């Protein structure tokens, strides 16, 4: 895990200006939070994609996941970075507890399965201890790389749109997958509170 983080740090270290972060409460409602005060005006960050998060989380107890997060955040701080971009939505799903989107298949066995803890909340709490700013990284429109709606969980909004016959305006379906239609007001409205 340490080698993975150091490799990510080496490859993905960038200087940007800082921006805000968001969190979800226990009902999955988005709220703006102050994660910490970064003393530098330079943003020096690393990105954790759903691949890395899956490795730390899927099939792991809360205790094991917390230990994995502690190691990643500690290594990030020791490398002189002050920000982590944490991918919270990768495929019209959620890598946190959400009342809108199903739990990602990358952190549970099947999309929509329950998870006993909120991985993103734990990540934020540990990052605070190390004065690391956490930013939510969202792929807002991508639902699936397949055009088969039956592969989505029954509570996936895209599948619900499809089954209700409302997918023509809300979704774009092509040979490369299913996407929320950015021109659809209903689709755009769905994305923020998710």
Image: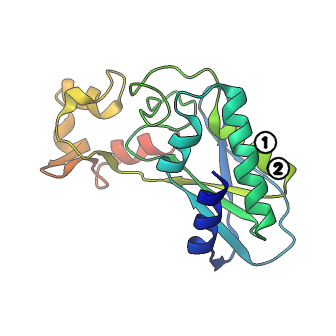
Which residue lies at the image location 44% right of the left edge and 44% below the top edge? 191
Q: Is residue 69 left or right of residue 8?
A: right
Q: Are marks 1 and 2 in contact (CB under 8 Å)?
A: yes
Among the 4 quarters of the image, the one containing residue 171 = top left
Report, in whole angstroms, how far the alpha carbon at label 1 lies from the one at label 2: 5 Å
Q: Most extreme residue toward the left, as rendered? A: 175
Q: Nearer the viewer, residue 192 or 176?
A: 176
Among the 4 quarters of the image, the one containing residue 122 = top right
Q: Is residue 71 above or below residue 67?
A: below
Disc 2 on helix, strand or loop?
A: helix
Q: Residues within 10 Å of mark 1 (few under 14, many from 20)?
A: some
Q: Is residue 81 left or right of residue 3?
A: right
Residue position marked by numbered label 2 in the rendering = 128
Q: Is residue 35 above or below residue 171?
A: below
Residue 30 numbered tag = none
Residue position marked by numbered label 1 in the rendering = 125
Coloring scheme used:
rainbow
Q: Is residue 31 left or right of residue 152?
A: right
Picture coordinates of residue 102 (x, y %)? 44, 29
Disc 1 on helix, strand or loop?
A: helix
Which residue lies at the image location 63% right of the left edge and 59% below the top edge? 3
Q: Nearer the viewer, residue 171 or 61?
A: 61
Picture coordinates of residue 168 (x, y %)? 16, 41
Picture coordinates of residue 42 (x, y %)? 75, 78
Which residue lies at the image location 57% right of the left edge and 30% below the top edge? 97
Q: Residues within 10 Å of mark 2 (few under 14, many from 20)?
A: some
């Amino acid at each position: 895990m340490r080698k993975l983080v150091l490799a990510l740090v080496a490859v993905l270290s960038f200087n940007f200006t800082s921006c805000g972060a968001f969190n979800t409460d226990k009902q999955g409602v988005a709220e703006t939070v102050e994660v910490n005060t970064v003393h530098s005006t330079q943003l020096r960050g690393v990105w954790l994609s759903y691949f890395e998060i899956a490795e730390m989380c899927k099939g792991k107890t809360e205790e094991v996941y917390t230990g994995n997060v502690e190691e990643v955040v500690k290594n990030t701080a020791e490398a002189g970075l002050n920000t982590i971009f944490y991918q919270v939505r990768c495929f019209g799903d959620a890598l946190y507890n959400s009342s809108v989107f199903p739990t990602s298949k990358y952190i549970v066995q099947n999309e929509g399965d329950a998870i006993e803890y909120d991985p993103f909340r734990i990540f934020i709490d540990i990052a605070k201890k190390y004065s690391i700013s956490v930013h939510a990284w969202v792929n807002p429109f991508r639902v699936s790389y397949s055009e088969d709606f039956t592969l989505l969980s029954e509570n996936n909004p895209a599948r619900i749109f499809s089954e209700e016959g409302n997918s023509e305006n809300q979704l774009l379906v092509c040979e490369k997958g299913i996407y929320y239609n950015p021109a659809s007001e209903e689709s755009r409205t769905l994305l923020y509170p998710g």
